[in-house]
Image: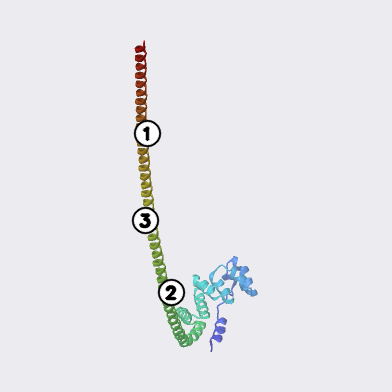
Amino acid sequence: MNLKTCCIALGLCVALPVQAGWFVKNDELALEAFQRGDYTRAAQMFEDPFRKGVALYRLARYREAAEAFSQEQREEVRLEALYDLGNTRFQLGDIEGAIHAYEAVLKENPRHRDAAYNLALARALVPQTTEEKKKEEEKRRAEEKRRREEERRKQAQEQKQGQQEKEQQQEQRLGQQKKEQQQKQQGQQKKEQQQKQGQQKKEQQQQQGQQKKEQQQKQGQQKKEQQQKQGQQKKEQQQKQGQKEGQQKKEQKQGQKQGQQQSGGKS
């Protein structure tokens, strides 16, 4: 019997709620919905986990059904919930989990024919499942190996790219440092040149100022000497003029005196 037929057989062996007395008053509407085949509404309205799990199983919502069956604690339905949990695990492909559930049912009730039947089907699939798992494991390992190799290639490429970027950044940094150093040297040279030119200009201005001062002093000295010379010449001229005028006056007086003497001699 293949897996599909097994699933159909398992579906026929699911325990169903057939006694209304099992339900509390609030579950009566849910039971009516279940009997009409409205399993979605029934799953929403059932309050106890066992019957909710049965409705979910009919909807093929096996994970939710398995969770509901696992929560059932009532002693009167606990064994059937455990059996249905095995069926649900089978539908999910958890063959080993299904076997554990069927074995637990048979441990408490060895006469449970449905559990025994489904257990035999599940055990018959174990070798096939093991082989499939082996193939899946080999596939997973191959995929993992490929992924690791891809990661190594990617890491190597990233490292290479990172190294190239690092070298490029280092070259840029060295270039920037060289540029800054050149700018600094040029700035220093320009500053020194400006200082030198300023010093030369200052010295030139000082020299020109000294020359101008000396020239002014020389001109002042020359002017002073010229003034002194002119004063001396004027003084000498005045003295000479005075001497000349004195001599003239003296001569004039002598002439007058001689004239008087001559006039007196005649008288």
- Pinpoint residue 247: horizontal percent, then vertical percent: 34, 24
Mark 1 and mark 2 lie on one chain; the one further toward the N terminus is: 2
- Pinpoint residue 132: horizontal percent, then vertical percent: 47, 86
- Pinpoint residue 103: horizontal percent, then vertical percent: 45, 81
Mark 1 and mark 3 lie on one chain; the one further toward the N terminus is: 3
Residue situated in front as seen by the camera: 194 or 63: 194
Q: Amino acid at mark 1?
A: Gln
Quadrant containing the C terminus is top left
* Secondary element type, mark 2: helix
Q: Amino acid at mark 2?
A: Gln
Residue name at image x 38 percent, y 60 percent: 184
**Which residue bears the numbered disc 1?**
230
Comparing marks 1 and 3, which lies closer to the viewer?
1
Comparing marks 1 and 2, which lies closer to the viewer?
1
Residue situated in front as seen by the camera: 211 or 106: 211
Numbered marks: total: 3
Q: Is residue 257 above or below residue 96?
A: above
Please give left or right for residue 199 compared with residue 104 in the image. left
- Pinpoint residue 82: horizontal percent, then vertical percent: 49, 76
Q: Is residue 137 above or below residue 35?
A: below
Q: Amino acid at mark 3?
A: Glu
* Secondary element type, mark 1: helix
**Which residue bears the numbered disc 3?**
192
Residue situated in front as seen by the camera: 126 or 207: 207
Mark linked to residue 161: 2
Q: CA distance from mark 2 to mark 3?
A: 45 Å
Q: Quadrant of residue 36?
A: bottom right
Q: Is residue 27 above or below residue 103?
A: above
* Disc 3 residue crowd, few under 14, some 14–19, many 20+, Cα 10 Å: few
Mark 2 and mark 3 lie on one chain; the one further toward the N terminus is: 2
